[in-house]
Amino acid sequence: MRIDVTSEPGDPRRPNEDYAAVALPASGSGGALVVLDGVTPPEEDTGCAHGVPWFTTRLGGALLELSGSRRDLTLRECLAEALARTAGAHRSTCDLSHVRTPQATVVAARWDEESVEHLVLSDSVLLAEAPDGEVTLLADDRLSRLPSEVDALREAVRALPPGSAERAASAADYVRAVEGYRNAEGGFFTAAADPEVAARALTGTLPRDGVRSLAALTDGASRWTEVFREGDWPDCLAVLRKEGARGLLRRVRAAESADPERRAFPRGKTHDDATVVLAEL
């Protein structure tokens, strides 16, 4: 078994809000992986004294421990319990009802001799490669399926000059529109303080002999395919196998640096926190 994990901050002056960890073996056999992408909050108050890196570390650590040690629980149940534990760790000091309380996207997987279970919540992704090389994308695309008026607001932002006051104001309108669909019916879901959001995660099980490798990527890493269109998902996995997780991130950083004003490839941040876990089973 080969495990390759790399995580880099988008801005070295800011803490990395991603989280990645792998447990081997899990409950005596197999393994488990967890990848979280913390949601960067606005500059204003979020109701939490701890911050996103603290949240992703607490949530990710709890989810990894539960996924690895509690085979009697489904991954959804593991996530719900991890969210409850994390909320309990700062409920007495923080306002967990705040709309921007710390939150994150989630990818989790665990495997044994018979099966590979997976869970995906929001826009980090999981790739599953079959022995014949076929790659299956396991993803939650609800964030990309918001109503057309939200798409129109995004395009209005992109049409304005970077750095202009007009663009900043338009971007604020777009962000407010997106936030109105966060953790709401007809919108998309992220892991925050409510354990019930675990029921919204996409889950499934694959036969163990049908999976040769798994790759979990936060959207800062998956932009190599999703934003820069440098290759499809099989190409992405081929780069990971040949050049390693660090090699893929080098390619992402090069593409970002070639378009610093985000004109050719519109995106929220020039450089984003980027994390990859490759598990060759």
Image: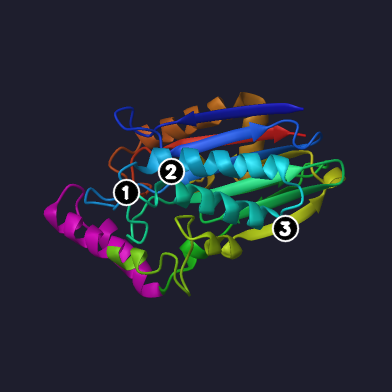
Q: In the displayed structure, does residue 32 sit left or right of residue 113? A: left
Query: What residue sits 48% from the left and 27% below the top?
Result: 250
The residue mark sitting in front, 3 or 2, is: 2
Residue 98, position as x, y percentages in the image = 32, 60
Cα gap from disc 1 to disc 3, whole angstroms: 33 Å
Label 2, secondary structure: give it: helix
* Disc assigned to residue 204: 3
Marks 3/2 in contact by CB < 8 Å: the verdict is no
Nearer-the-camera pick, 67 or 241 = 67
Magenta span of residues: 148-175
Cα gap from disc 3 to disc 2, whole angstroms: 26 Å
Magenta region includes residue 12: no
Q: Quadrant of the C terminus?
A: top right
Disc with the residue nearer the chain's start (3 vs 2): 2
Label 1, secondary structure: give it: loop
Above-or-below relation of 11 to 206: above
Label 3, secondary structure: give it: strand
Disc 3 packing (10 Å; few <14; some 14–19; many ≥20): few
Which amino acid type is shown beneath numbered disc 1? Cys
Residue bearing mark 2:
55
